[in-house]
Image (cartoon, helix red, strand yellow):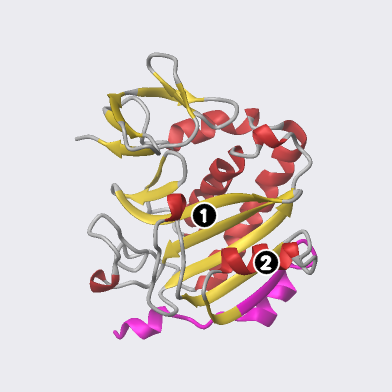
Amino acid sequence: MGNELHREALRESELHAELSPYWRVSVVDVTGSTQVDLAESIRAHSAVDGDVLVANYQSDGKGRLDREFIAAPSAALLFSLYKKVTRPRDEWNFIALLTALSITEALTDLDKKITLSIKWPNDILVNDKKVAGLLCQGENDGVIVGVGLNVGMQETELPVVTATSLYLEKFSQLDRNEILKRILKSFREKFEVWHVQGSAPFISQYENLCSSLNRDIQIIWPAGDSLATQATGISIRGELILNNGVLVNSADVLHLR
């Protein structure tokens, strides 16, 4: 079966009809970055709370720490969403963890056979291989969340050997429209709870899915220095709690065998 059969076209009218009025979905065929486009719309005062921009292809996609993320046309689900936030700004980092929970919940709902985990803070793994990543950036009085999910990629199209795709994992639903609907539904439910109650209702759920806990890991700080350690939990603000009590807010985590 040709892989093109696993690359359903994005159906903007269907997405808009089923997800509005909470979400306002727009689809573009090609762009540099949905994250940049949405940020520019916010600065131009043309974006509204609940805007979602989805692209078939990004020529300048970026992941966390400004890493390049490029996927073949229609092979990945690439989107950014914008939500206004009224909770204190020092709590906003947890939105990344909330999004990771939303993606894992959505994918599990679509195919109960898949086993997912989260590498802190926001990489989604299948059998220790990365299938999705995300990044968050504050913009004025809200947050832009960008998501890249490998859907129809064949092995030769993967960016690194430590990645995988839903297609390669024999996931039962490869229609990006259906996956996007489920992710946005899950995110809306969690975001509304978080907006009222904060992160407390989600800590144990995240810890149960987080494969970075209670194992040997290496923390790689933004400056490049590193620390071999173990993590024991997640703080109320989404920080990684190390076994010496140190809280990690921003770093890369390497899982050691």
Disc assigned to residue 33: none
Using the image, determine if residue 169 lies above or below residue 2.
above
Residue shown at the point (29%, 49%) measured from the top left: 127
C-alpha gap between disc 1 and disc 2: 34 Å
Give the residue at mark 2: 40
Which element carries disc 2, helix, strand or loop?
Answer: helix
Using the image, determine if residue 96 lies above or below residue 219.
below
Using the image, determine if residue 257 lies above or below residue 169.
above
Q: Is residue 107 visible?
A: yes
Q: Which residues are magenta?
A: 1-27
Quarter of the image holding residue 235?
A: top right
Q: Is residue 17 magenta?
A: yes
Which element carries disc 1, helix, strand or loop?
Answer: helix
Q: 150 or 1: which is nearer to us? A: 150
Q: Residue furthest front?
A: 223
Residue shown at the point (67%, 75%) measured from the top left: 26
x, y (%) of residue 108?
A: 47, 52
Structural crowding at the residue carrying mark 2, measured as other residues with C-alpha within 10 Å and reported as few (<14), some (14–19) or many (≥20):
some
Q: Is residue 102 magenta?
A: no
Structural crowding at the residue carrying mark 1, measured as other residues with C-alpha within 10 Å and reported as few (<14), some (14–19) or many (≥20):
some
x, y (%) of residue 208?
A: 45, 32
Give the residue at mark 1: 109
Q: Give amino acid for label 2.
A: Glu
Q: Tell me if 183 is positioned left or right of 217 in this view.
A: right
